Amino acid sequence: MATANRSNLSRRNLFAVMGLVVLCGFLFLWRLGGYSLFNITEARQAEVARQIWVRHDWVTPVYNGKFYFDKPILLHWLIALGFPILGVGEWAVRLPSAISAIALVLVTWLFTTRFATQRTALLAATMVAANPFTFALGRTGQHDMLLVFFMTAALYSWYWAYSTGQSFGYLLFFGLLAFAVLAKGPLALLLSSLIIGIFLIWVNRWQKQLSSVPWGWGILVFSGITLPWYILAFQANGWYFINSFFVFSNATRFVSVNQNQSGPWYYYLICLAVGFFPWLALIPGAMSWRSLRLWLRLDYWRQRDSNQQIGLFMTIWLMAVLVFMSAAATKLLWYVYPGIPALAYLCAQAWEQQISEPRRSLKFSLGFIGLVYALLAVGFALIPHLVDQPILQSTGVTSILWLWFLLYSAATVAIAISLLRVQPVWAWLISVGTFSLFALTVVDPLLPMLDGQVLGGRLIPIARALQQETCKECDRDLPAALGVTWPSLNFYSQIDRIKRFKKPCEVQTQFKRVQRLLLVTTDEEMQLANLDLSGYQPAYVSDIFKLFIIPPDDELAQQQCRFNQSKSFLKPESDATLIQSFD
């Protein structure tokens, strides 16, 4: 009998893993290269990685001829390693994030099976996968998904070691945490230390834990992974690296607002409600005044066995991320994403509790999800009446809005049926299926449709033309741009440095030189700069973007230069601003 039970359990585990792999493959790999890189962050990381591959310099990241120490090097390494295999394109840029997202889902399932039921593990894993946060970051080539995977796996490893006494778990924690630090800097170390420290103080086991951790081997593993690049970067670039990376990109961003990205104290509560939709609706139904008082009692948790303190650990994890990020001056919606795995566990545990002990709170949770689905359906139906039809028709979005209306209307009806029959498992399947179908329409046709009309795809033909016209083996040409700062221009043209003019007088000065000027700009930017190029026909045009080819020492250009010397000029954007990251 025991053998049969183990066989059935193994079979269920196999089916669960296969189902998760299929779901993740659909969400994170399907048509991963079906649309161009997003400006600014993703395209910039891609260009930095391309520079590593082209220059064969694996220590100093460079963007547009300038040192770029906004983030550590791990993502750029992984992208650059993919270029020889996958080509210089979207797949190679996004694959590290996609693989990290899949690994995050699987490691969440594996960890949760150790401390909860199989159903709770499956619920938690699907919640980590099927939400707007993971879907967006798992399909975008930026550092956050790498950070969250390695940091989450590190915290899972630590709690496993804490509850079992396995020294290997602590070493695994140090190694994974090192990769997290190499992914996005000291943030992972600060957050992990904060989470573990508060937890150990809460349960009054910090003294025992200090003596249980193999600190010598752990520090050796951590240092062996993280320090080589930091040491080499300092040797190659000196204090410029320290000031750019540690001071400006980390400390300054925490204490002062960067790129006008600020927000109120409740900013991340809104981000969680939107980014973790619809699963966050499960928490209120599982809460009660009695349970809150129980959770706040120190003696309650200190008397429990170490492997029964997982709920407290996840709560501290979530709250530490939420409070720490809310205290930072600079706020971006995905900064709170490191708390999502903990929130997924809490929501899955709440749903499991309501499934096992059906009560009124279950109907509240399901009813709330159904209500939000209904509001979304109504919203999608109203958008065509509230927004100018020419805009929607020109982008082809109207048909997709009606498709979303039908999708969420059907989901509302299905949730209502599951509510009447008290079938929470149905509601879970409906929610996963609805999000997956919604994601399908976003990946195709929405993003490819918008890519060539309002997103970065409009610039690709100009970038290809600039690549074709520029002589890289000689100094005959100067590729340049006025008002077009998108990093995708560098990446798709594969030109290492494109001169970004900040003032029209710089453009006019170039007219007097011996180089041929290849200028990418738009009518709006020329108007703002009082730059008249009516004497030239653009060599290439793509939507709003134009490529002008101006021969050297051109008399007409010099006349225009003298005419415009007294004109107002475009407000400059500093070099530092140009290379600042929005992530």
Image (spheres, rainbow, N blue to C red):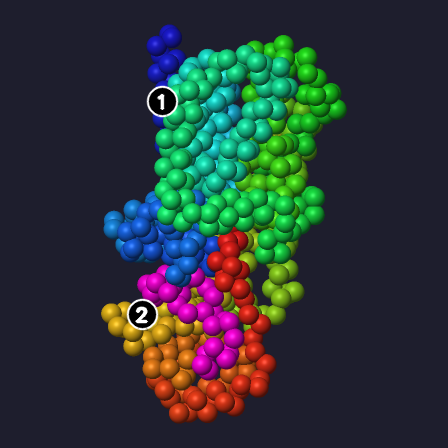
Q: Is residue 52 left or right of residue 322?
A: left
User: Is residue 100 placed above or below 401 in the rendered structure?
Assistant: above
Could you tell me the amino acid type at mark 2? Gln
Q: Is residue 419 left or right of residue 441?
A: right
SS at badge 1? helix
Q: Residue at x 32, y 47 (%)?
A: 58
Evaluate whether residue 48 shows in this view: yes
Question: What residue would you read off at disc 1?
Answer: 11
Task: Please identify the quadrant where the N terminus is shown.
Answer: top left
Start and end of the magenta stretch? 483-509
- Taking depth in this image into account, of 581 and 399 the one nearest to the observer is 581
Q: Residue at x 47, y 72 (%)?
A: 501
Evaluate whether residue 426 shows in this view: no
User: Is residue 374 placed above or below 113 in the rendered structure?
Assistant: below
Question: What residue would you read off at disc 2?
Answer: 467
Residue 344 on image: x %, y %: 55, 32
Residue 142 on image: x %, y %: 44, 48
Which label is found at residue 355? none
Q: Residue at x 70, y 47 (%)?
A: 264
Q: Residue at x 57, y 84 (%)?
A: 567
SS at badge 2? helix
- Taking depth in this image into account, of 124 and 133 the one nearest to the observer is 133
Q: Is residue 579 left or right of residue 378?
A: left
Task: Find the residue positioned furthest to the top.
Answer: 1
Answer with mark 2 or mark 1, whichever residue precedes in sequence.
Answer: 1
Could you tell me the amino acid type at mark 1? Arg
- Residue 350: which quarter of the image? top right
Q: Is residue 494 magenta?
A: yes
Residue 545 on image: x %, y %: 44, 74
